[in-house]
Amino acid sequence: MIYPDFAQELEKIDARGLRRHMRVFESPQQPRAVVDGREIRLFASNSYLGLSNHPSVLEAAQNALARYGSGSGGSRLTTGTYTPHVELETEIADFKGTEAALVLSSGFLTNSTVITAITDPTWTVFCDKLNHASIIDGCRHSGARFVPYAHADMSDLEKKVRQKMGGKGLIVTDGVFSMDGDIAPLPAIVDIAARYGLMTMVDDAHAAGVLGATGAGTSEYYQVKGKVDIEMGTLSKAFAAEGGYIASSRALIDFLIHRARGFIFSTAMAPHTAAAALAAIRICRAEPGIRRHLLELSRSFAAQIAQTGFTTSRGETPILPVLVKTPENAVHLSRALWDEGFFVPAIRPPTVKESRLRFSLMASHTHKDCEDAALALARAAGKAGIRPEALHD
Ligand SMILES: *Cc1c(COP(=O)(O)O)cnc(C)c1O
């Protein structure tokens, strides 16, 4: 029995122009990728450091695959902990400057299970409105009192903390926001937390490997390393593998090993995935030039997009949104760019409130790639009949 509501829901999705399709890759994430059977210039990947096919990453993964086999065979607490997991956790703790670290099988799982494990209905969680869905799911599952605050708005945060406090509390924020590419005001968050006796958590999915002198992320970028209680990150983006991690105190990590259901009851990531992530973090730490090039590209690309008349970010991170008002505009522009040979995704509700194109850069891009993309954006707008000036308020 398949209930008819599913088909009806899909019809509604279609009617609103929100139907999703999956593009199929036949190459690694690289500036010229093979997608749906054609070579396309890729401006859609979260592999920010361009390490998905780096020789040292591949070699580490291949060696681990040959040595340990393909799957981990169990959860971390049974048979699933291998040498690469332990080495990876040691490396992450050192990278992040914390006592300990714990690796889980995805970033989504990490946020949802860790927030669920540490909070309960007696807690209040203050959450930036643009935080990732996995953070919100964690709050829902724990039953904590959930208090969203206006995006990056510190006076709204402090007002809500004053109104709602009493008992234990956590302020949680993305370090770099995934669809806007802006950086959270972490020093102010740390300051409010200290004044009101709250814990802090930062999700560095898009910041680790990208921001800070050694690539350690948002707290390093602002020089508040060591002042954030829980540093969360993923191995799936800049580090070109998959998995999530928590870097924190030894006590908190040991608590999670005993209480985080997504750690206890889920099979460990494959050992070769841990080995690949470890190799990528080591490259990131040893070669700051990769990150410098990426951030230089971001700044100059933001200026080039602005010259086309569209509104984008300041280019502080490799995520560059181009705001286009309606889902239809986003879809038409993305399609016109695809026809020009560029893969730039349309991001629409419910993922974001305001429809947009989301350009993302990789360190393997060149300045020429970015110039070409900005020119293609201008041509695509012409073909789609969209005048950027008409989109401004
Ligand atoms: C991608 C992402 C996650 C989830 O990480 P995965 O490794 O993809 O499961 C969590 N938080 C943020 C902010 C993200 O962008």
Image (cartoon, rainbow, N blue to C red):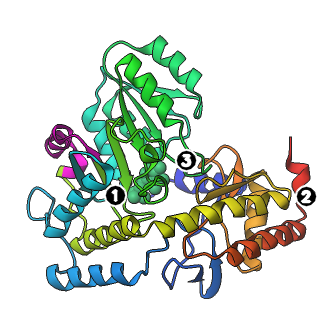
* Residue at which label 3 appears: 177
Q: Is residue 163 above or below residue 312?
A: above
Crowd band around label 1 with a 10 angstrom C-alpha radius: few (<14), some (14–19), many (20+) = many
Hey, which quadrant is residue 315 in on the image?
bottom right
How far apart marks 1 and 3 lie (CA) works out to 18 Å
Q: Residue furthest left?
A: 78
* Residue at which label 1 appears: 106
Question: In terms of secondary structure, where does tag 1 sit?
Answer: loop
Q: Amino acid at mark 2?
A: Arg
Ligand 1 neighbours mark 1 (CB distance < 8 Å): yes
Crowd band around label 2 with a 10 angstrom C-alpha radius: few (<14), some (14–19), many (20+) = some
Measured from the top left, where is residue 69 in percent x and y?
18, 81
Of mark 1 and mark 3, the one earlier in the sequence is 1
Q: Quadrant of the N terminus?
A: bottom left
Of marks 1 and 3, the one in the foreground = 3
Q: Is residue 307 above or below residue 287?
A: above
Hey, which quadrant is residue 392 in on the image?
top right
Measured from the top left, where is residue 108 in percent x and y?
38, 52
Of marks 3 and 2, the one in the foreground = 3
At a point 53% along the width and 40% down the height, the residue shown is: 184
